Amino acid sequence: MSSATISKISQKIKSLPENLLQEVDQYIDFLKYKNDQSDWSESISDDELSLIENGKKDIEEGRVYSHKEAKQKIADYIKNKVH
């Protein structure tokens, strides 16, 4: 990118009201993410990979909950923590 383009963008950003700067920042993050061609799975740690493998084993061995059961377990857990 040319320095003239960077300068134009910088001037436009400087002229924005302060309340829009967070939106600009978030949009820049989105553009960077959209442009990133790397596969997220290539950057997971060994610990994360181990957790995924454990989860796959749980599924294979039937140690799973339905969505309804999981919601109930979470609700029960929260209820017990509050009281």
Image: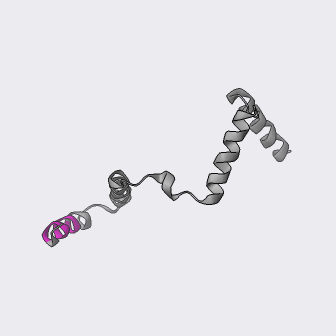
In the image, what residue occupies the spot 71% across and 34% down?
A: 60
Highlighted range, magenta: 4-11
* Color style of the picture: one colour
47 relative to 74 in the view: left or right: left
Identify the main secondary structure in magenta.
Answer: helix
Rendered position, 69 above or below 7: above
Measured as percent of width and height from the top left, residue 75 is found at: 76, 36
Measured as percent of width and height from the top left, residue 62 is found at: 75, 31
Measured as percent of width and height from the top left, residue 23 is found at: 36, 55
What is the total number of numbered labels drawn onto the structure image?
Answer: 0
Rendered position, 72 above or below 53: above
Nearest to the observer: residue 8 or residue 83 = 8
Nearest to the observer: residue 19 or residue 73 = 73
33 relative to 67 in the view: left or right: left
In the image, what residue occupies the spot 78% across and 35% down?
A: 73
32 relative to 7 in the view: left or right: right
Q: Is residue 27 magenta?
A: no
Nearest to the observer: residue 21 or residue 2 = 2
In the image, what residue occupies the spot 71% across and 40% down?
A: 57
Measured as percent of width and height from the top left, residue 67 is found at: 68, 29
Question: In the picture, which quadrant includes the N terminus?
Answer: bottom left
Question: In the picture, which quadrant includes the C terminus?
Answer: top right
In the image, what residue occupies the spot 71% across and 27% down?
A: 68
Rendered position, 10 above or below 66: below
